[in-house]
Amino acid sequence: MEFAGKVAVITGGASGIGKGIVHALLSRGASVVVADIEQGVLDATVAELSPLGALRGVRCDVTDAASITALANDVYGTEGVVDFLFANAGVTSGGGGLPWEQEMNDWRWCFGVNVFGVAGTILEFLPRMLAADREAHLITTSSGDGGIAPVPHASIYAASKAAISCFTESLAHQLTKVGSPVGAHVFYPGGGLLDTGLWTAQRNRPKDLERVKPRPPAPGTSFEEFREQLKAAGMKADVVDLNWLGDFVLDALAADKYVIAPNCETFGPLLHSRADAIAAGQVPPTLIH
Ligand SMILES: NC(=O)c1ccc[n+]([C@@H]2O[C@H](COP(=O)([O-])OP(=O)(O)OC[C@H]3O[C@@H](n4cnc5c(N)ncnc54)[C@H](O)[C@@H]3O)[C@@H](O)[C@H]2O)c1
């Protein structure tokens, strides 16, 4: 797969995992449009990575349909085509906790970005990508948490990512069924500890979706606590180089993978045990307890 000369759009690409993908795309000669809600970080990332290639930033809030339409109009008016669309922007639901302690605003914010934001991005871009009738790829960023099995103390986030995995799978089948040259892929970031802005996702939480009842951070939800949980689950807990992860994503696309996951092989045994439990009418095992 050739990335040189291609156009990529990535939501939530100003920091963390998305920024690693931007780095990889630029390194391989693609032109990149980063769409992100955080103007300051967006500007800093564009300034930092511009020496690598053709990069520009567009402020976009994926929860706002008009903002996504403006982004698509901008890209199609400027670059004229989209070869790779990464629907990557995502947030937590605000600090974990017991499922019945969550508030509707936790659901609204998390699903607003992770589910409706991805839906809005796809609904705006995919018809245009299909109309171009040329090879293109749409990649959603899901999570092993929910996409493979839930982390129970992140119940809303897990539910949002389960929705995205399920939707992307439906999309992949339907694109194949109609013989489209556009492919869908699902990305499960992993391979160790991901030191990204997700741990401070609250910085982008809108005022009108704040929690009604403030509460201290729930136990088990800090970066350090997560490191211990990964270790206890026998999973890799070293901090992952995000530029390496970006390269991994592009290599997986080039290898025609539908599932893009650095720790794909660990999913098999877990999914088998989940299938066995479900078939026996039992609650299936989780990703991390
Ligand atoms: N960090 C992890 O451990 C992990 C694991 C699995 C999946 N993920 C997923 O990876 C993706 C990227 O997250 P990350 O870990 O790099 O975190 P991050 O906070 O570093 O990156 C997320 C980006 O999304 C942007 N964003 C937030 N709300 C937005 C909105 N409404 N519109 C547009 N942009 C918005 C943020 O400004 C940020 O730049 C997310 O979908 C996340 O759920 C992360």
Image: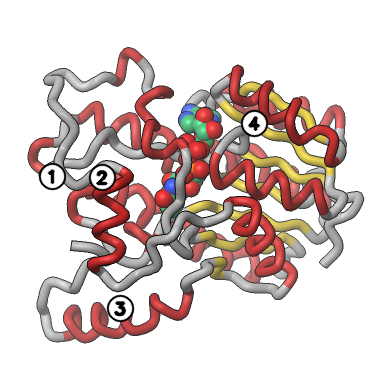
The residue carrying mark 4 has its beta carbon less than 8 Å from ligand 1: yes
Q: Which mark is residue 35?
A: 4
Say whether residue 118 is left or right of residue 286: right
Quarter of the figure with the C terminus: bottom left
Say whether residue 284 is left or right of residue 58: left
- For disc 1, the marked residue is 99
- For disc 3, the marked residue is 270
Which badge, 1 or 3, is on the more N-terminal residue? 1
Q: CA distance from mark 3 to mark 4?
A: 35 Å
Vertical placement of 178 versus 104: above or below?
below
Which residue occupies the extreme top position in the image? 207
Which badge, 1 or 4, is on the more N-terminal residue? 4
Q: Looking at the picture, which amino acid does disc 4 mark?
A: Ala
Which badge, 2 or 1, is on the more N-terminal residue? 1
Q: Residue at x 30, y 31 (%)?
A: 108
Q: Looking at the picture, which amino acid does disc 2 mark?
A: Ile
- For disc 2, the marked residue is 156
Q: Position of residue 173 (x, y in %)?
A: 56, 69
Q: CA distance from mark 2 to mark 1?
A: 8 Å
How many numbered marks are there?
A: 4
